[in-house]
Amino acid sequence: MEPLFALIIGLLVAAGVFLLLSRVIVRVVLGLSFIAYAANLAILTVAGLRDVSPPLLTLPGPYTDPLPQALILTAIVIGFATTALLLTVALRAYQVAGHDDVAAFGDNLARDPDAQDGSFADPEHQSPDRPDVEDEEADPAPTGGRP
Amino acid sequence: MTLAVFFPFLMAALAAWLGPRLGRRTGYVAAAAFLPALLLIPDLLRMPGATPALEVTRWVPTLDLDLAFRGDGFSLLFAVLIGVIGTLASLYSVAYLSDRERFGRFYSYLLLFGGSMLGLVLTDNLVALFGFWEMTSVTSFLLIGLWHTRSAARDGAVKAFLVSALGGLALLAAVALIALGGGSTSLSALDVAALRESAYFAPALLLTLLAAFTKSAQLPFHLWLPTAMEAPTPVSAFLHSATMVKAGVVLVAKFGLLFGSSALWSGIIVPVGLATLVWGSWLALRQTDLKALLAYSTVSQLGLLMSLYGLADAEGRFAATVHLLNHAAFKAALFFVVGIIDHETGTREIPLLGGLRRALPVTFAVALLASLSMAGLPPLGGFISKELFYETMLHQGPLFLAVAVAGSALTFAYSFRLMRVFWGSPRAPAGATPHEAPLGLTVPAAGLALTALAFGLLPGTAETLTRTASAALNFADYGGYLKLWHGVTPALLATVLTWLIGAALVWRAATVEALGRRLTPRVNANTVYYALTQTVNVFSSWLIARTQGLPLPDQLRIMLAAAALMAGYAVWRAPQVFPPIGTPPLGVLPVAALLVAGAVGVLLSRGRLTAVIVTGLTGFGSAAAFLAFRAPDLALTQLLVEAVTVILFLLAFRYLPGVRDLPRTRGRYAFDVLVAGLAGVGATLLVLASLRFQAPPISPYYLEYSYKGGGGKNVVNVILVDFRGFDTLGEVLVVGMVALAVLSLVRLGKPGRPRRAPDDAAELAADLAARRRP
């Protein structure tokens, strides 16, 4: 049974990698999900798929290996967090760039290597002691379009 | 003592919560946080006779890391000093801060600093010392950068942080070496003799000095302190004159007992301290900004303290401790005065101000007392400690005395330059009508100035306070005592000489200024710092542009191809075994079908909804697989996560355009199919290869001890929350960080107003054009 799952895992990874390389941002996110599914199944498979009891001590033994299950449980949650983060980044990138073509992001999100990073404090001249309070609510919302 | 350290941390949380509710009145809560520190006064007054109390809270005993606080005379003296200045700064800030200040943030940072600083001086554990040291650096960074919309504040904060982080790393190494050499992480239990014998002695000494010099702004690390004046004035008074910058001095004072036997110790500290004294006061004389003047003055006074403690003899430590008290009193008072002037006139530029003594009589009196003390004139405390300083330097040799006189004459001159804003014809920037500041501002300043006066008129008070540290700093056998008139001594003659030179500097101010302009070095610490940071910035931008400049898919192709090469090599080297598939049980086939259907379906799908639903097939397929292979918890979790993921995608689709497959460029399609295919084959081979490992499983331990040790019958759960609890903690942290990142990204985008998802390119273009229009 394990070789069958090895094949399925290979298929899932192939689909994930193919999606990961596509130009549409949502497909990139989905690609990552597929790789995560494959990884979880791989951990389960390499520990052996045996027809015994689940690791619940209320049932009669023998039991399957509980350790891979614990690892997978953590991996599922982390995978979900990654998906959520990537999806939000995708959303944000779309709002900033105005399109969802991953291949074209580099042009308008990358920094100009020759630009100066802000201005420096001049120790000889110091301004009076007042806060410049930024007003988050009042300032105009950053508009998305910057294609 | 433990309470005195931790109470400010608790109150910081409270202040953060109260800030938006109470507004500026949060300052009174903040002042209360220093009460436990002030309650150490009775303990302090029992010194030096009493045995120092040791309070130990076990923390990580296996790492020799305990929260040990030891109340020796010097630590208590400094802790009380922190308590007093902290209370005054909190009260002062109540009247000082603008209405638009974020009080919660300001006071919680201030209290976090207060707690860290108290911990730093009171701790007996070397590791904790390093921790508190770094915490003061971080809170100082936060306070300097409080008004982070200003580039000057950001720059000042980063500069201060980089310089003190350099020192922090040095201290970490020093602490490790001392603990190795001395055989203990407890300062009071160190084997000093063994440390002196060990090979770690010299490196530890040098690293300690680097830490002390960066923190206490000694040459050439003085550059961060003047730009740190971007912080609000109460912060400057508290952190950057009275307490935090003295952390390095405290370190030298305390570690002087370990390292003082070495000639290297005094040989480095005293010249650096004296050079800082002269150069700092020379720079202070040239400033036009009142706060910058005080900043350089602090640099020079720290140099004085350094040189005295660095002598590592009883006389030097006594003189330094007296001056430490005097300096805290007059310098904090002067910062408060500058804050008042800034508050009333809106400027700190000396040329723009004049004749303020009529408008601000109380402030004038405070400033006069404090600056007379700074200049070292009788009958103020500063005079007494300056005499002691001369006396001590005289014992070292005439050259030391000459340098000391030069630095003090410059100090005399800039003290008068500071007072210039009060004399002459009344001048203030247009629109400002200066009038006396509210009591909330003048009372803390006046209290400190009167203390400076009391230290002079009643030398016994300063003497008593200083003597509390005599046992801790080992100067009990120093016989001298404080008084205003010692008779005609060489020190007095030197003082008179100082006044004469100082008066000449004041008299010929124009000449001095012209000389100063001519003497300005082209290269200074600041230009070096900016050259360094600029180089790093330019280099990293260049590196990113050259190595990460490709579009994301191409970047990923390179990464995946590299991974494929490495993994391919491993697969190629591994012996390949292909076990037969056999006949899987019928029940597994639907599961396999679900998994495959999802993967194939998503590649064929066109619409965005279809893609997500088809992905869901694989998700539910793996949940089914978990169920089939005896992992009920996983199946449950996977189902829940799958449901939440679908909801998440649907939410995101509200703002994202459809999943239409943009065509890959020619040539890349084939390449992508190849890479994906290779990755799939590689994954399959990897799983097959892993199946061959026949090492005995480690799980029987968990099965056996799950109930006995963890008290649970669901072994997976017990592993997660008990045996491998730290993994779960890390997982929770990851989820928390992701939640914060998502929250901040979503708030950046302000998707509160639903954005239309344009369906076709024309609509998208029209939408974008509409948004670009102003």
Image (tube, coloured by chain):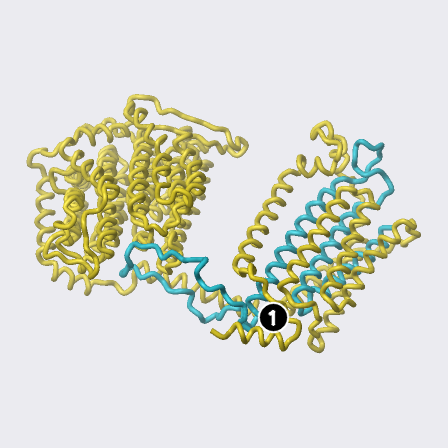
Q: Residue at x 43, y 31 (%)?
A: B186
Q: Return the x and y of residue B161 as percentages of the image width and height.
A: 40, 51
Looking at the picture, which amino acid does disc 1 mark? His
Residue closer to the observer: B737 or B695:
B737
Q: Residue at x 40, y 39 (%)?
A: B116
- What SS does tag 1 mark? loop
Q: Residue at x 75, y 35 (%)?
A: B714
Horizontal arrangement in the rendering, residue B37 relative to residue B735 (left or right)? left
Q: Chain of mark 1?
A: A
Instruction: Name the residue tied to disc 1.
Output: A99
Number of numbered discs visible in the structure rendering: 1
Q: Return the x and y of residue B233 as percentages of the image width and height.
A: 29, 49
Q: Residue at x 48, y 70 (%)?
A: A113
Q: Return the x and y of residue B579 as percentages of the image width and height.
A: 88, 53
Rendered cyan, the chain in question is A
Few, some or many residues within 10 Å of mark 1 (<14, 14–19, 20+): many
Where is the N terminus of chain B found, in terms of image quarters? top left
Horizontal arrangement in the rendering, residue B170 relative to residue B558 (left or right)? left
Instruction: Find residue B76 and report its image quarter.
Output: top left
Residue closer to the observer: B403 or A26:
A26
Q: Return the x and y of residue B8 as percentages of the image width and height.
A: 40, 36
The answer to whether residue B48 of the structure is visible from this angle is no
**Of all residues shown, which one is farthest toward the top?**
B50
The answer to whether residue A37 of the structure is visible from this angle is yes
Drawing shade for chain B: yellow
Q: Is residue B357 above or below residue B515?
A: above
Residue closer to the observer: B272 or B637:
B637
Residue closer to the observer: A34 or B258:
A34
